[in-house]
Image (tube, coloured by chain):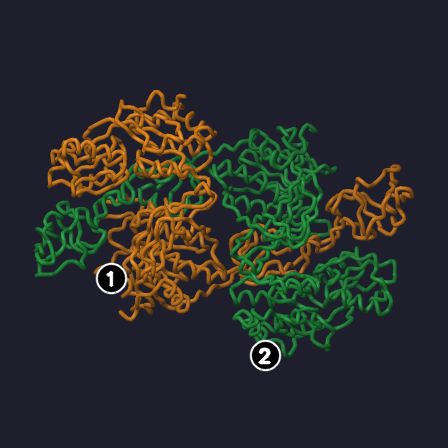
Chain colours: A green, B orange
Amino acid sequence: MERARMAAVNEAREILLESAPPRPKVERIATRKARGRITAEPVRARLSMPSYPASAMDGIAVRSGRTQTATPETPVSLIEGTDFVWINTGDPLPEWTDAVIMVERVHIRGEREVAVTDPAIPFQHVRQIGEDVAAGETLLMARVRIRPVDQASLLAGGVREVPVLTRPRVTIIPTGKELVPPEIDPARGEIIEFNSTLLAETLQEWGAETRHGGIVPDDPDQIRRAVETALEWSDLVIVNAGSSKGSQDFVPAVLQKMGHLLVHGVAARPGKPTALAVVEGKPVLGLPGYPVSAHLSLEWFAKPWMEAWQGQETPSGESITARLAEPVKTRVGAEDHLRVRVVATPDGGWEALPLFRGAGATFSLSQADGWLRVPAETGEWKRGHEVSVRLSRPSSVIRRRLWIAGGDDPALDVLVSAWSEAIGRPVARQATGEQEAVNRWRNGLCVGIVLETDAGGPCPALPDGWDDQPATVVPLGEREWGWWVQKGNPHGITGVSDWRRSDLRWILPPRGYGSRLFLERLAARAGIPVPDACCEIASCLKAAAAVSGGTAHAAWGIRTDLPPSDCWFLPDTRRSLYLLLSPAVAKATEGQVLLALLRDEKVRTALMNEGLELSMTAGRD
Amino acid sequence: MERARMAAVNEAREILLESAPPRPKVERIATRKARGRITAEPVRARLSMPSYPASAMDGIAVRSGRTQTATPETPVSLIEGTDFVWINTGDPLPEWTDAVIMVERVHIRGEREVAVTDPAIPFQHVRQIGEDVAAGETLLMARVRIRPVDQASLLAGGVREVPVLTRPRVTIIPTGKELVPPEIDPARGEIIEFNSTLLAETLQEWGAETRHGGIVPDDPDQIRRAVETALEWSDLVIVNAGSSKGSQDFVPAVLQKMGHLLVHGVAARPGKPTALAVVEGKPVLGLPGYPVSAHLSLEWFAKPWMEAWQGQETPSGESITARLAEPVKTRVGAEDHLRVRVVATPDGGWEALPLFRGAGATFSLSQADGWLRVPAETGEWKRGHEVSVRLSRPSSVIRRRLWIAGGDDPALDVLVSAWSEAIGRPVARQATGEQEAVNRWRNGLCVGIVLETDAGGPCPALPDGWDDQPATVVPLGEREWGWWVQKGNPHGITGVSDWRRSDLRWILPPRGYGSRLFLERLAARAGIPVPDACCEIASCLKAAAAVSGGTAHAAWGIRTDLPPSDCWFLPDTRRSLYLLLSPAVAKATEGQVLLALLRDEKVRTALMNEGLELSMTAGRD
């Protein structure tokens, strides 16, 4: 068992491909259904296209020799039936003709007589047999991915059936007693099993046929039987989770008994708890349980195996060069894979913003624009360092995206989504502190920022340096802020004054956020320090959700109907929300559309349903 | 009728989008089936993930306060059940605990007693409720293309069904009395109807649902009824062919009667005979009949309409900057769209080689690597001019491709395909003249060239300048050459001496090709000039096919079983075929694999079946 060892990702991949090389089979399928499939052998035309000499023009078909003396001064007269016939594009040429004169060059002389003033060159405007495709010509080489234009050229050559490689068959077996299918709402201790969807859909994109092996509990015997059954149909089997070194991680031992465990553990974060085995000559991959790890491990091992099967690379994302928006620190010894958001910079370049690194952060996987690989020997990259980012969405989409920075408010999603739809460009929000938002705005990295201030007070006090680039200030409305506490407020929390108590754990907005600055000012006035037992969460909804779990006692946030119902909201204060729009965007169609949306009754109602008490002047010029 | 006018492509597109804007509907579908679909509205999480505070580590769950005094010198002792519980990754945290200490930091003291030497920070190694996804969070904005990672994050948030835009429904109606479905071999005057496959498969790639409207003859009433029926189901209707200005082109008039003809004719080559109309508020596109024109016109009009439907760009090919390998001449007044092959240059750049321009050349559509647009006002671009090429296959595939230049021989396809398969890289042939082949080789644009010489004679006489870069000369074998003539040789053709006759039309290899040079030497010795009535075709198979049509009387070519059986082959001479391999490739694995293939019995048999009489030394070192 312990013979299988930890390996670098590259090394592990080579071991897998050598020990369990793909063995594709060949099947003949209809050319009409062959899009995306891979040719198994060179494909030759069966018929010629055109299959007869055809006219390439509307006009008359003639014997070229008959027209050799024609000039504007000495036109040659031709008699229908004997010297010429009328012909349309695509019509077969009579056997006694060898050229076509286009209708624009034909002078009508009588009912059955025309004249021409230029000699016709032999073969002029004639599509020879086989001009497009000649029988016997190789239309596609082996190992070519068939596109619509290839289907067309196959059909043109009379090829109705095409020999293609079978799709690799992959069975995915999720394991874990805590898993429930997505159709069931999870109880405490249960987790929705969505990894198999993530893996299957990705594999299908790469060209695989997939099956779900059923959720199997963490039981060595059941795992073994599930793998055995899967191997009957599959070319590759994936067991998801149970490949680590914990007491419930049976997969490596099971695979070692069934066949040969090649690798146990790869030197990468996330993705380390991966087990690679060969059973009955087929690869069996034990992938980590966390979705991010499973996703990466699939890319490292299943993808190259499928590429070897298909004899070519899987079409994958672009790579770009970006500058790091913040320093990156990693532990040396294993390569790190970081999700990043990518922002287009005004100079035409790119900036990469590392996201939350948690391996369980499925949402960040969806939010990410790409991946940054930090080599095993690198411990730190400074802000501004140039890195290569492998994109997970098209660069054209990222380039067109508009950014809003600043404080979090779920109501902003309603506005941003309506705006995005109306202007046909993606718009994204990034929660940041106030100063960070202003910096991003000043560097052209976002078109707007969200600031908050005391209700009824003046417009947000603009930080230093703002004035030289006057923003358009759009008052959005007011919002009730307060403390989310456990139902019934069992700890009798009243507000910032309770920060003195040592029995409470708090969830606060991160340092530098407008709402945090407000609390700090409040506490400072009363001489109360920020409590040690606190955790910073930028998202209002995540903060409230965390309180509902009981590990924290109170979270500062907005009144909203969205988070779990087993919390109480203790209202504390009212604050105003402002959107500051860059002058360029405010003047452009984009900005005008946004202001119009803020006057739109449907949008206003939607925003009010989010708990935002709209300013009368929002959207009014 | 003549109110509809000719328009530039851009202008025509705008008219279409304004007159028949897309009207997508919304449907709710299972998240598991939603890959590739477009969100219709913002999608929010219904549940939090995790739905309970969970351990992020294997270890013990504790109350952090209980461990505050722990140091290596003053460890804190903890009793199981009272002070701690053992916990695995993902397990729910007991309500009385608020932190996890990883197993590596726990010192076992007794059966139910452990000690810790560091204080636990509140929330340490705890995944809060909603850490991944909090209920209410916006997981996807509207108008986002759903990827597998998005499906995963939706399911994590308990979203089983997702509101998406309906796929646009498109019906394609091929028209023309000469069309037969691909299941039938065409008789003289008939054409296989493959355009509808080309159009439907392309539209499906862009996200449409398509239907085939049945082949309809060129009859105004039948066309009208077919469009009427199609409109019942469709969001967009395509009528293929009949949109030009010929006597059989009824589509524009029919569409004008049914609704409003917006545009008739676009200023572009190919693609000009396009008609755009709006009927019952829906767009009806009359696309040209030639496959290349239909393909382009679909890109110009159906694609942007679908992008407007989806609220985003269709993922499409990359664009690269390439240098023209030869000058390009076009007529001003209409934009020209040229198919090009793209070759990676040794300096990391790209070279673009324009292909045959015929609008009926389906095969060239499949062979092309991309498109070059020549603006309406440009008449000529010089060789070396920098142009932008829109690729129709991934640049990574093009970059890895190896090229063989020189004379055409269908047997080479067998060799090249086997080679490509064995080395896992695309290999392509380009038929060129001898000097052109040598030039390309010397410029690093191909790794091998094919030369021919008199059988039994010395190795090919290497053109000037070759010597300083010694090639590896691989003798392939001998090949019988002669004249393809009509069955029974009705014109009594014997050879080059018949070039003197004025009643014959010839098909010869293009100037500069090895086989053409051979014929010219032969003729020059006898004092015979090259005949005027001749047409140049590079492909041996296309040349033979053209003779079978009767428009030409004789074609110079190789003996092969592949072309139509209604020709006779008059043997004339035997010539030897040599492959000259670049020294770098000959030494590399790629070259070694090729030499090994030439020794392989299966490959040798396949080559001999192609009529190549293999040299004993082919592949022998």
Residue B240 higher or lower than B604, as above or below: below
Viewer-proximal residue among B245 and A547: B245
Does B542 sit left or right of A426 as displayed?
left
User: What amino acid type should be assigned to the residue bearing mark 2?
Assistant: Asp
* Residue at (55% x, 46% y) in the render: A202
Using a 10 Å C-alpha cutoff, classify the residue at mark 2 as few (fewer than 14 neighbours), some (14 to 19) or many (20 or more).
few
User: What amino acid type should be assigned to the residue bearing mark 1?
Assistant: Lys
* Residue at (72% x, 68% y) in the render: A559
Give the Cα distance between marks 1 and 2: 54 Å
* Residue at (83% x, 66% y) in the render: A496
The kind of secondary structure element at disc 1 is loop
Numbered disc 2: what chain? A
The kind of secondary structure element at disc 2 is loop
- Residue A387 lies, in percent from the top left, at 61, 48
Q: Residue furthest right?
A: B74
Where residue B572 sits, quadrant-wise, is top left
Asked if both marks, 1 and 2, belong to the same chain, the answer given is no
Residue B86 marker: none
- Residue A167 lies, in percent from the top left, at 48, 39
- Residue A209 lies, in percent from the top left, at 51, 42
Using a 10 Å C-alpha cutoff, classify the residue at mark 1 as few (fewer than 14 neighbours), some (14 to 19) or many (20 or more).
some
Number of marks present in the image shown: 2
Where residue A346 sits, quadrant-wise, is bottom right
Viewer-proximal residue among A252 and B438: B438
**Does any portion of residue B292 appear in the rendered image?**
yes
Residue B510 higher or lower than B477, as above or below: below
Numbered disc 1: what chain? B
- Residue B430 lies, in percent from the top left, at 35, 39
Residue A621 marker: 2
Residue B51 higher or lower than A482, as above or below: above
Where the C terminus of chain A falls, by quadrant?
bottom right
- Quickly name the residue at label 1: B245
